Amino acid sequence: MLNGLFKTQLALGLAQAGVAALAAIAVMLLARRRHIHVERETVVALVRGLAQIMIVGSILVLMLRGPRWTSVFILAAMTVAAAATSARRAKRIPGAFRVSLYAIAAGAGTVIALMTFAGAIDTAITALVPVGSMLIANAMNTNGLALDRFRSEVYAHVGQVEAGLALGAAPEQTVAPYVQAAYQASLIPAIDNLRSLGIVWIPGLMAGMVLSGSPPLYAAVYQFVVIAMIFAASGLTCLISTTLIRERAFSPAEQLVLRPGAVTAR
Amino acid sequence: MPHPIVRTEHLTRAVDGRRIVDDISIEVEQGDVLAIVGPSGAGKSSFLRLLNRLDEPSSGTFYVDGRDYREISPRALRRRLGMVMQTAFLFPGTVAENVRFGPRQHGGTLDDEAIARLLEQVALPGFASRNVANLSGGEAQRVAFARCLANSPDVLLLDEPTSALDDAAKREIESLVREIVVARRLTCLIVTHDTAQAARIAQRVMVIENGKLSRIGSLQEVLGVERTV
């Protein structure tokens, strides 16, 4: 229907974005009827998301014409933005931004570097930046989930953690079950993606490759390559972030500082 | 002259500008049983948490057998000044796994016989293989005592260990505390809001109000009563 109404591709794209946003707003209004208020957050996220992707698209047009080494700077900037987004999910965790930055840079960065070196990712800026951004974005999501789950688990088990400390246990020992729970929970989406690949969903990358003329079988196998890389990057990121964050849950004198609410006299 | 086993010197903890423990200086001799009483929110448990170093003093200090607490690693200090909390907070698994937890943290082991002896002491013979999920409140608190004693502490810090228990379980824990303290020659600081309980367990009493030490002395001096057991 929209195809017949718009002559330029940009106008068509904006109209499609409007329709998709309307669907999201309709869901938001349904939620509102059940007294779940996410109106402001949804509208801001929609406007922000569209503006960001259009700005990035415009910058990419310019940068894709640049030399290959500029990919490093683009991916580095994406990593910083990803860390900031992740850290917002982990409010009240001391040093969440730094932890997220180190974890995403080391987790996604290592996988991107290794895969580029091995030839699984092409060094052309048109391949490295989109594939790298997928790895960084998924690492960001996993990291945010891990930090959020770790905080919830520790908040729910302050008594057990302090009972362990009071018996002379090492801090990392007292939170070990919660690190494990956070790690497992945060990797569920990545595992499910891998499991349901091709059955429940056909990812955009594969569809794009087929549309641009790549043999469908190669496109399918390469999609698996990307999803496996996403899993590796997310897993490594999460492993690093949960290791770093468990240290920040305690003071130098091995006292639990990651705890809910204000401290009052008891 | 021997040092008091615990001595606090102007011990203070302030949070957001409010002094929840305010300038407390006391001495506790080896073998003393000192009850800490006072109204809710007075800072009794906060004071005890400082001695186990679960919280950090803002100023002042305390000494354990003459050594400043900062000269002792937090883990070693916590083993020496063992703490039993209001709720048992047992770890998932068996009673034996809980009792082994402390010694295992510093490379020690407890054989089955040692565990059986500890469980006898807390009147839970034959409980070693029981899952902690199936214990009553009183039984769980006894396991918490056994778990603490497995570290062979010199001082027991008891933070209202009977407040979540019914009267029968409360009396059992009280007699357990008296027996353990005598049998192991332990020093004990027990937080309680119940002055009658203080009279059943302690030799001395300190009263904390608004974070400050208001009185300290014998049962007779502070509460005007004699020991009732």
Image (cartoon, rainbow, N blue to C red):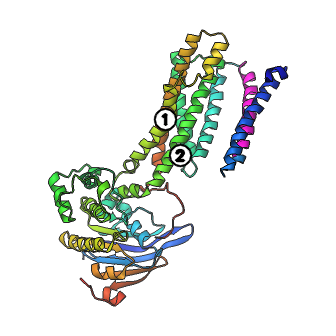
* Chain under disc 2: A
x, y percent for residue A49: 71, 36
Is residue A110 visible in the rendered image? The answer is: no
Main secondary structure along the magenta-highlighted residues: helix
Q: Residue drawn 73% across and 18% down?
A: A65
Name the residue that disc number 2 marks.
Answer: A148
Q: Residue drawn 27% across and 72% down?
A: B187
Q: What quarter of the picture does the C terminus of chain B occupy?
A: bottom left
Q: What quarter of the picture does the N terminus of chain B occupy?
A: bottom left
x, y percent for residue A213: 65, 9
Find the magenta span and give its range.
A40-65
x, y percent for residue B3: 28, 73
Dot 2 alpha-carbon crowd within 10 angstroms: few under 14, some 14 to 19, many 20 or more: many
Mark 2 or mark 1, which is nearer the start of the sequence? Answer: 2
In this rendering, the answer to whether B201 lies above or below A230 is below
- B45 sits left or right of B93 in the view: right
Q: Quadrant of residue B39?
A: bottom left
Q: Is residue A47 magenta?
A: yes
Is residue A219 visible in the rendered image? The answer is: yes
CA gap, disc 1 and disc 2: 13 Å
Q: Is residue B200 magenta?
A: no
Dot 1 alpha-carbon crowd within 10 angstroms: few under 14, some 14 to 19, many 20 or more: many
x, y percent for residue A164: 35, 55
Label 2 residue SS: helix
Disc marking residue A45: none
Q: Quadrant of residue A223?
A: top right
Q: Report the front residue among A140 and B24.
A: A140
Name the residue that disc number 1 marks.
Answer: A187
Question: Which kind of residue does numbered mark 2 sit on?
Answer: Asp
